[in-house]
Image (spheres, grey):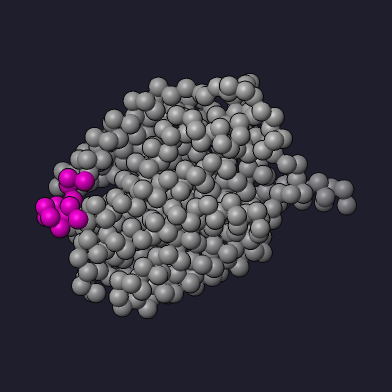
Amino acid sequence: MTSLIAREPYAGKWCAFGGASLVFFFLNAATFTSLGVVLFTMGADLHWSNTNTGYGFTALGLACGLSSPLAAVSMTLLGGRGSLGLGAALLAIGFGVAAITQTLAVFFVAMMFLGVGYTLAGNVPGVYLLAGWFRRRSAPIIGYYLMMGALGAAFGPPVVEAIVRHYGWRIHWQVMAAAAAGIAAICLLIVRDAQDAPAPQTVAATPAGIGAGWSYRQAILTPQFLLVCGAMIMTMCCVTTNSSSLVAHLVKLGASPKAAAYVLSAGALTATMVKGGSGRLCELVSPPVLLGAGLLFQAVGCTLLAMATTPLLQYGSALTFGIGWGLSFVAAHIVPLNYFGGVTGAKILSVVALLTTLAAAGPLAAGMIADHTGSFSPIYDIYAVLLLILAVPVVMMRAPRHKAVLPVAAE
């Protein structure tokens, strides 16, 4: 009996990791990364302009970003298990509404459900749930969790393209609705919160004097927090714009929709592999340096993508951008945990997610530019410049220091 009790926390933490990773895999496979693939066919069938399809993608980003504070509320009221289950259930509803779309307004409603579902089952509650179970050296675990999401982003585009090509976009949404309902049931069955395990005080090994005693209010007023937000906003601007516009962009440059979907998948697959190693890398190299390097790689990828008229340039841009995406995404999650401690760091990730709502303007801006200029290339040139400018202060960023150290218990 004693051995069974001793093993229960061990099983519980890996069930939590498995459930959270399954949801995050599906989220990235079925929403942001592959949405541009289905919108390409859906928009043509419903006679939507590039701007209108951009509005649809922006609606998803706005719903996801503006609802981000609900993640903390949901975890407080329902716990990690309930939050994941509710989020997956809302995804099922959103996919079901998308399947019956006839007008842009109905599609907006579907995107609202998907955005809130993403918030309640996405990376903020996922990181918080894993922080409760994995108290020591959690950076690699968080990296593996984020890698699973990136793996979904890699598998999503070609799978979605095949479903849409063979069965149509309405069947695609129906399949996603059924999958989301099944995942909700799995999460409710296998995921358990870590309240029976020792409560974590930190979720990442940090140097003495760093990451201890920060209050939520102190943390969000630091320049370091603002730089992390800026890095995440720019990263998500690029990712969401790629997801919404890359297929249309490459088709304009001569690629087929199928080939463009594979390029999109190649970038996500590269990010997957990089995310898998970035958690461990954050223990060996300063996370701000990795964050800045990620921004630089993204800038190079955007520059190549703007002129990607050949398969070599297309896959080169996907490879380069994928490296930057993976480095930036993981490092941006680890920096707040290292600088402000596990408890406060996990809390302010929801604020970072809220501010990344600004990234929802990316797909809309890309669509408007394409309608006016006939090309998506200008938006990628603009992103490259902004990423280069932001990378400089990020690389130079140092850990914030307290004016007065507050006890952790006060949080």
Q: Is residue 209 above or below residue 181?
A: above
Seen as rendered, the residue at the extreme left is 373
Seen as rendered, the residue at the extreme right is 1
Q: How many marks?
A: 0
**Residue 338 point in image, percent of width and height:** 56, 30
- Confirm whether residue 270 shows in the render: no
**Residue 178 point in image, percent of width and height:** 49, 73
Q: Is residue 378 magenta?
A: yes
The secondary structure that dominates the magenta segment is helix
Q: Residue at x 30, y 35 (%)?
A: 387
- Answer left or right for 83 relative to 265: right
Q: Is residue 33 above or below residue 333?
A: below
Q: Nearer the viewer, residue 224 or 300?
A: 224
Q: Residue at x 53, y 52 (%)?
A: 69
- Answer left or right for 25 relative to 209: left
Q: Is residue 224 magenta?
A: no
The stretch of residues the image draws in magenta is 368-379
Q: Nearer the viewer, residue 182 or 224?
A: 224
**Res 42 quadrant in image:** bottom left
Q: Residue at x 48, y 25 (%)?
A: 286
**Residue 239 point in image, percent of width and height:** 34, 48
**Res 308 quadrant in image:** top left
- Answer left or right for 143 relative to 167: right
**Res 321 quadrant in image:** top left
Q: Is residue 125 above or below residue 101?
A: above
Q: Residue at x 52, y 46 (%)?
A: 350
Q: Nearer the viewer, residue 399 or 402?
A: 402
Q: Quadrant of the C terminus?
A: top right
- Confirm whether residue 370 shows in the render: yes
**Residue 266 point in image, percent of width and height:** 33, 49
